Amino acid sequence: MVWIRYIVYFASIVAVTWALMQMELASPGSLKLHILVDDADILGTSEYSPIEIIQAIILGSCGVIMAWVARFCPSQRPIAFLFGGMALIFLIRELDYFFDRFLVDNLWQALVVIAAALVMAYIYRHRLRLRIALARIWPSPGLTFLFCGAVILFAIVWLVGHERLWMSILGDDYRRVIKIAVEEFIELIGYLLWMVGTIEYAFQARAVAYRAPQPAARRRREKRRQDSTGRF
């Protein structure tokens, strides 16, 4: 039944993208990718955009799923804590505008540092358990999707969303909303892949947690068979 999930993933991603496109076509400006909140605002913001809201929902959902894995799949707790912590850090970063505007300026930076420090301290303390958890679940389709999402979020978005790049491409026709639109849609792709990876990882973690234990000799024999079949 795995292939049914992948069809659902494909249909869901297409539906979300199509809905956002139709929203903008039906009512130009409804995506709110560049709005001025007051007269003193020069650059504008996209934080009120439905795309940004969807991204926050995705990150919150990923955090909840990883919390479930950490609670009910103890053998995978270090990995779940790592990626759940990353989802929390991403969520804080996505909400930076609201922290700065309605709470305390640069509060989000302090929260990111605290969350990152807790994640790194936990991973360092349980580094052996992390290696064991990876050995139990690898190769993992879920972790592969998470890696692909991370590549898009950490590399592609940062490079393609560079303002000087779009100034060079568009020249005198440069408009900041174009750069923001491309950046946000690519970022949405990364978060959607992150969501798919989180769901797939949760399924696999549950299977590993409830799998009947095998003798060490049998595990080594199966590993040798997998290694031999994987060779050219």
Image (cartoon, helix red, strand yellow):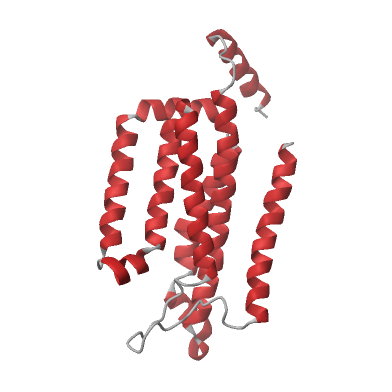
Horizontal and vertical percent position of residue 142: 57, 40
All told, the count of numbered labels is: 0
The residue lying at 44 percent from left, 49 percent from top is 87
Where in the figure is residue 10, as x and y percent of width and height?
Answer: 70, 53
Quadrant where the N terminus sits is top right
Residue in the image at 51% along x and 57% along y? 57
Indicate the position of residue 181 as horizontal and vertical percent values.
Answer: 54, 74
Q: Which quadrant of the rendered structure holds the C terminus?
A: top right
Please indicate, yes or no, whether residue 38 appears anywhere in the rendered image: yes
Q: Does residue 170 appear left or right of residue 6 in this picture?
A: left
Which quadrant of the figure has residue 38?
Answer: bottom left
Q: Work out whether 118 lies above or below 92.
A: above
**Towards the viewer: 152 or 37:** 37
Direction from residue 167 to residue 107 in the image, left or right: left
Residue at 57%, 79% in the rendered image: 30
Residue 144 can be seen, yes or no: no
Q: Quadrant of residue 158?
A: bottom left
Residue projecting furthest to the front: 102
Residue 157 in the image, given as x and y percentages of width and height = 48, 63
- Where 150 falls versus 136 (above or below)? below
